[in-house]
């Protein structure tokens, strides 16, 4: 291959690489703008008045996601599920999920109550919970599903699990579960931590990716100019 053909090939490759990386950068910017719009809607939703989950009919949980809610009912503490390998404040423990039978109703809502430390000497030991036996009022926000970890094979049964799916658990337990989760947010003296991560859409991540793609595009252009123009005697002479 002669010098002219090699120069044309390198130029074409550099142009294609710049176009590709620039387009990926703009795509990430568009994703960021979409996430900003979604974040604005979520913020507005969380400022709205509380909903009572009693008789709440949800056809699409995304329309009510993160709305503040309150629920009155009775804990089914013996049905509590402990989701393992969940970190909070630099420690590993359990997320506690307890069914709440709604007042004057047969409907049951799963409540993500909080986090509790595990016993590292006996990983099968169930932490002792403080659960009032009478009528309780729970304040929190609606979430469509419980946080999920990667798991090989099918989810295990028992009180200690890796993940919990509403439909699967409803079929397994026979409880008429609502199609949403209440994430409890109020601070109570019940030994559970509720330092939940802030509700966000990850818009910063997309801006970071866009910066990387645009930076790579600029680097390709700079290297091309440096090696093919400034450092190339034939190109300088022409």
Image (tube, rainbow, N blue to C red):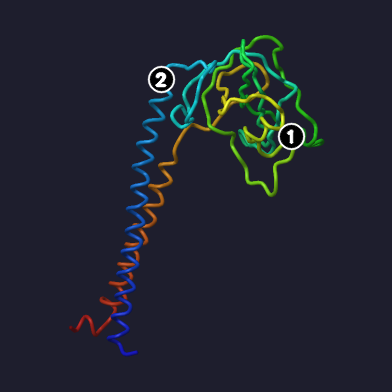
Left/right placement of residue 221 relative to residue 88 reads left
The quadrant the C terminus occupies is bottom left
Give 90 or 46, whichever is nearer the viewer: 46
Looking at the picture, how far across and down is residue 47, in whole percent? 41, 21
**Label 1–label 2 contact, CB within 8 A:** no
Q: Which structural element holds mark 1?
A: strand
Check the image and name the residue furthest to the bottom.
2
The residue at which mark 2 appears reads as 48
Q: Residues within 10 Å of mark 2 (few under 14, many from 20)?
A: few
Q: Based on the displayed image, in which of its 4 quarters is residue 5 positioned?
A: bottom left
Disc 1 residue crowd, few under 14, some 14–19, many 20+, Cα 10 Å: some
Q: Secondary structure at mark 2?
A: loop
Q: What label does residue 160 carry, if any? A: 1
* Residue at (24% x, 85% y) in the render: 234
Q: Quadrant of residue 232?
A: bottom left
- Residue 190 position (above or below residue 6): above
Residue 75 shown left or right of residue 141 in the figure:
right
Vertical placement of 43 versus 131: above or below? below
């Amino acid at each position: 291959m002669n010098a002219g053909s090699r120069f044309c090939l390198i130029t074409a490759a550099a142009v294609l690489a710049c176009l590709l990386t620039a387009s990926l950068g703009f795509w990430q910017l568009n994703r960021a703008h979409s996430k900003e719009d979604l974040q604005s809607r979520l913020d507005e939703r969380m400022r709205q008045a509380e909903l009572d989950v009693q008789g709440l009919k949800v056809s699409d949980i995304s329309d009510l996601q993160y709305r503040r809610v309150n629920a009155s009912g009775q804990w089914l503490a013996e049905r509590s599920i402990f989701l393992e390998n969940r970190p909070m404040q630099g420690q590993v423990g359990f997320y506690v999920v307890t069914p709440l039978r709604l007042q004057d109703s047969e409907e049951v809502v799963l409540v993500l109550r909080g986090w509790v430390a595990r016993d590292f000497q006996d990983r099968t030991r169930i932490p002792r919970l403080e659960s009032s036996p009478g009528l309780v009022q729970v304040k929190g926000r609606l979430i469509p599903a419980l946080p999920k970890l990667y798991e090989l094979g099918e989810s295990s049964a028992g009180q200690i699990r890796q993940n919990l799916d509403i439909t699967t658990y409803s079929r397994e337990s026979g409880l008429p579960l609502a199609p949403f989760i209440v994430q409890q947010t109020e601070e109570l003296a019940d030994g559970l931590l509720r330092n939940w991560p802030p509700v966000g859409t990850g818009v910063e991540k997309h801006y970071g990716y866009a910066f990387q793609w645009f930076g790579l595009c600029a680097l390709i252009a700079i290297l091309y100019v440096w090696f093919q123009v400034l450092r190339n005697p034939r190109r300088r002479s022409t």
